[in-house]
Image (cartoon, grey):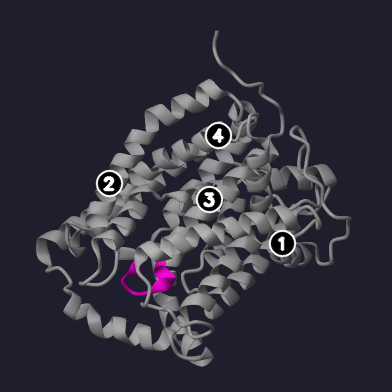
Amino acid sequence: MRERGAVRPGRVQDVDVLRGFALFGILLVNAQLMAGPYTAFGGGPDASAVDRAAAWAVTATTSLYQLFSFLFGYSFVLQERSARESGSPSALHHLRRTAGLFGLGLVHAVLLYPGDILMTYAALGLVLYGLRGLSPRAAVRVAVCLVAGLAALLLGYGLLTVAFTEPVTPAQYAPEAARAVAACRGGFLSVVGAHLRELPTALGANLTYTPDMLAAFLAGLAAAKAGLVERRGRDRLWLRGVVVRWLPVGLAGGVVTACCADGPLDSRWFLVGHAVSLLTAPALTASYACGLLLLTGAARPAAARVLAASGRMALTQYLSQSLVLALVFTGYGFGLYDRVGTAVVLAGCLVLYGAQLALGAWLMGRVRYAPAELVLRTVTLGRCPGGSPRRSPSPGSAPAADEPRRVP
């Protein structure tokens, strides 16, 4: 007898569960980047083997930014459906929401973390709105072309870099690293100044990877239109098959990426590794998502509720992660920039993520909107949303018209 869970309509909570999980991967990546100029690579020239191994493992196994982008596209469709059912002016609401998301992202980038993704998501959200009429098959085809085209460009440029340039040595990078350390350990104006100087570079990096982000948006849009989570979110046989088939592919690509980014290959191989990651990260992302739905099925409803609560306030959680990390690593607080090894940073991420899960479960049981979601919803509606403290939706419920269905 085939093992199948009952397929129940409107698995909204599954989307929230996945979003809550994706926050952990985002935290791992951002914490390393905010902790010091070398932390994401396992530390400087004299770093310990433990720190290097920790950074290598994160690079090889983390692709959850892509899951976050996929869920943005998926939730976009849920929002559009809710707007149509309620008769709301979806175009105006979407434009206001995009403006609000961009504004939050700009404040976030200047004050907390210049590697912000909200501004990029806001801009691409306008593109997604223009492509909302694509059929699921057409959306997937466009997504495949975007990923393949960007991977080909990065691979070609990366191979030229390997052939015709010399690797960057620690001595060459040291002056830039020293300036970053001095600025980030300084006072408020010093930190903000450093963020403003880094912002063009960060935006340029985001711009380079916009085809991949848009591809993930379109994949999410196609999946939502096809009702993938609703149809397969509790189909344990199908979920297990995805994990078994695609996890090895995703991890193999992650290992190649880690070898190129964190050693033993030198810095010239960085873009080659990222080209490989573009092609294999979807397999790793799908495996993680399906594996999580397997683990948080009917047998573990408490775990699902905790993750879903955090997922429903993902914008607040994303911003609060940066706030805590800024207080820890910059002159805003303890000034530990470039003073903590990668392994310690990652251990701290576990503590912070656990605290966020607890906060999410507590807060979303008492209010309808978390702080950042309330701000964004107010901008979207042009008024302060009313309503009593939110209740967790039943497993088969669809999002209400006034319900925030996604975050960045």
Which residue was labeled with disc 3? 22
Looking at the image, is mark 2 or mark 1 earlier in the sequence?
2
User: Is 208 placed above or below 197 here?
Assistant: above
User: Is 139 placed above or below 232 here?
Assistant: below
Q: Are marks 2 and 1 in contact (CB under 8 Å)?
A: no
Q: Nearer the viewer, residue 303 or 91?
A: 303
Residue drawn at point x = 25 percent, y = 59 percent: 262
Under mark 4, the amino acid is Leu
Query: Measured from the top left, where is residue 73 in percent x and y?
Result: 58, 47
Looking at the image, is mark 1 or mark 4 earlier in the sequence?
4
Query: Measured from the top left, where is residue 234 in percent x and y?
Result: 61, 27
Which residue was labeled with disc 1? 373
Q: Nearer the viewer, mark 3 or mark 4?
A: 4
Under mark 1, the amino acid is Glu
Looking at the image, is mark 4 or mark 2 earlier in the sequence?
2
Please check the rendered image and state whether residue 35 is part of the magenta-colored stretch, yes or no: yes
Which residue was labeled with disc 2? 255
Looking at the image, is mark 3 or mark 4 earlier in the sequence?
3
Q: Are marks 3 and 4 in contact (CB under 8 Å)?
A: no
Q: Are marks 3 and 1 in contact (CB under 8 Å)?
A: no
Disc 3 and disc 2: Cα gap in Å?
20 Å
Task: Specify start and end residues of the magenta stretch as a single range.
Answer: 32-39
Looking at the image, is mark 3 or mark 1 earlier in the sequence?
3
Under mark 2, the amino acid is Val
Structural crowding at the residue carrying mark 1, measured as other residues with C-alpha within 10 Å and reported as few (<14), some (14–19) or many (≥20): many
